[in-house]
Amino acid sequence: MQAEIVIAGFGGQGVMVLGELLAYAGMLENRNVSWFPSYGPEMRGGTANCTVVISDRRIGSPVVSRPGILVAMNLPSSLKFAPLVLENGLILYNSSLIEQPPDRQDVRVISVPANKIADDLGESRIANMVVLGALIGASGVVSLDAVTESLKKVLPARRHNLIPLNRKALEAGMALASAVSA
Amino acid sequence: MRQIFGRPASLTDVPMHYCPGCTHGIIHRLVAEVMDELGIREKTIGIASVGCSVFAYEYFNCDMQQASHGRAPAVATGIKRVWPDRVVFTYQGDGDLASIGAGEIVHAAARGENITVIFVNNAVYGMTGGQMAPTTLLGQKTTTTPLGREARRNGMPVRVVELLSQLDGPAYLARVSVHNPKMVNTAKRAIRAAFQAQLDGRGFSLVEVLSTCPTNWGLTPVEALKWLEDNMIPYYPLGEVRTPSSASRQAGVPAAASTATAPTPAAFGATGTAPATRGKEGE
Amino acid sequence: MPERVLMKGNEAVGEAAIQAGCRYFFGYPITPQNEVPEYMARRLPEVGGVYLQAESEVAAINMVYGAAGAGVRVMTSSSSPGISLMQEGISYICGAELPCVIVNMVRGGPGLGSIQPAQSDYFQATKGGGHGDYRLIVLAPSSLQEIFDLMGLAFPLAEKYRNPVMILGDGVLGQMMEPVVLPDEPAQAPPPPPWATTGCQGRRPNVINSLYIEADACEAHNRRLQAKYDEIARKEVRYEALNTSDAEVVLVAYGSVARVCHSAMELARAEGIKVGLFRPITLWPFPSQALAQIAAGTGETGVAGASGTAGAPGRGDSPGPAFLTVEMSAGGQMVEDVRLAVNGLRPVHFYGRSGGVVPTPHEVLEQIRALRKAVAA
């Protein structure tokens, strides 16, 4: 199995770290993984994206033209990447910031009010964790435990006190995904 | 029979290629005598540059590296960072150091790189046949300033010691000459002080040595010495601009305070040099 | 499974060098390789090494010259415009026969170009770049693990042949993250060689030099260098050949583009198109002979290196494949070496993206389909 995932949004929405957590979790599950960031002028324009590949095979291109899964954290990202998602793929979009759902009938589209759920949990900065939870809930690409374990590696030690809160956000996202699927 | 004069151990027994009357040979000998007297030959690594002194690696009887044009201070930096307890010196001419290598010398000085630079200024490109150097004096004729250097067209000559004296990195900066025996002795004292500064771990040291180029100046060796004295020294005043004991090198002195020190060289004890003139000689 | 560490490519370059016994780094900031000097500035002091930020790439490569001449494992890292500035120094290092490692994380050109990934410095790396008849050994990793493998090879190779080794990567390789397995044992740098300038205590002085003022002497020096390059070309060729024995089309690509082509090969095979991949690991010496054998239908599949070849036998009597060289280069650079190797035996095609655009697997697949259609027509 090979999952090819694009995560895109504004700088500051935590899209890079979201991708890093996915890659790390994949590695902990003994899969092959790669993470490739946008860098340069795009970053300076305020949008950021990264591509994560998780695979049981040798990973070829770390750059993906047609992702199977898209996480769109803001409208420009949705407009840019939604048309590229493969048929029968998966799009998770941050409906707290994106009013207009991606116009794709041939893929699964999940609306995640990520900022709202994060605010309800009392920490607006964990919106990315809510979406990550929804992503693993909807796709099963990596396990919740592996992502939780990855938090310890990816977050600096001084932020480890936030891991329980991050786990809550992940669980909230997962719950939302399973509710949608049910 | 007692031998009272001989070749320093730090010079090889190889005939030098320099033109008759050129003062490179004297300067090589002074460096070698200092190496002998300090007992550092076996722990010294020299860097030859590009120009007339390109073959210095054949003359100094110590480990040597030949550097590309202007880059000797960078090469010296690489060596010194590997072997901080060895003595590392560069031997560079004015085209090499003050023109193409201006960046490297400024930054080695700014870092206070613990190396010694012997800078030979003869106001002309010698090896390539007498073209204008950054140190060519106003009015001085060269093959690329056939009517004489002119400020509007060619800019002003560069005073390297004064330029570097604006930096806090150097521990020792001096300008000397070798146009008469007395000056030769003074020059040797400066070269020794520069190497001593390095041995003491004080940081960057540079001695600018005013030198002659009878061939490219179109003068006899004796005329050339006189020309140096009459023309170069007024523009390039002799003396020590920075010594390890200078106030500006003391730890904790803010940059503003140290750069406020006058860059005019302090004359050596008995040299009685002419004061610095910043006018446009030759116009 | 041995412990894997998730690293960024540029950090892998730094750690791989430290694991390879390198303790001296001189560099200058330039995107997209800034994490290399940043990593070295942090890590080298921890292992008793020296990191120095030079005033320019010109100074940096000359510091490398000095340190290499002083007998230690030393490296620098830069990206295209910075490597251009280093060319004079690289020529001197080759002339003086000093070992060192130079990393080039290539970006789009010419001029200031872009800061995105490119492979448009292949000619500069493999055909000279500076003045004089000289060669660099050029290694092209295509994964972070291979960065470790090739860095571990680079220093011993440089020392064995007293010749600089260039690791040619690009922005993709530098910026991506991937798990790596660190070497079991970090390598130890050898003691300074007898020719190094360490101070002449107890021996005759050593001279590091590339000047041979007499024409005859300079020619003799060049002949010695050429003999050395011939030996390297005989002994140090490395490449990977996948699925080439039954292929109609063999993709030829190196570095990150070889990964794109690997994906394209899988897409094509899923459609029933027999596609293979030939990936030079040494760009110089170029694996010409292996490529010629594939063109002749007698090539082998597998990874081949200095230790010999491995893999399945050739295709027997069926004709060799067509070749499609894919590069991040506008006009193609490596494709010229592919054409020289294939020597007209089979068609050699080219597909390139440039200026920082990375070709995608689907783009390459389209090229393969078009090529096949043209052959059928």
Image (cartoon, grey):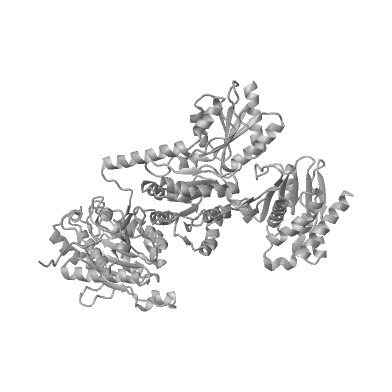
User: Is C119 displayed left or right of A159 in the figure?
Assistant: left
Residue A125: x and y, percent?
A: 74, 63
Residue A21: x and y, percent?
A: 71, 56
Residue drawn where x is 79% and y is 46% of the image: A90
Q: Total label count?
A: 0
Q: Nearer the viewer, residue C71 or B261?
A: C71
Q: Nearer the viewer, residue C313 or C240?
A: C313
Is residue A57 among what the camera can see?
yes
Residue drawn where x is 16% and y is 67% of the image: B180
Residue A76: x and y, percent?
A: 72, 51
Which residue lies most toward the left here? Answer: B1
User: Is A5 displayed left or right of B175 in the figure?
Assistant: right
Q: Is residue C95 above or below residue C342?
A: below
Q: Nearer the viewer, residue C59 or A124?
A: C59
Residue drawn where x is 56% and y is 50% of the image: C148
Residue C27: x and y, percent?
A: 48, 57
Quadrant location of residue B61? bottom left
Is residue B278 among what the camera can see?
no
Q: Nearer the viewer, residue C16 or B97?
A: C16
The quadrant in which the C terminus of chain C is found is top right
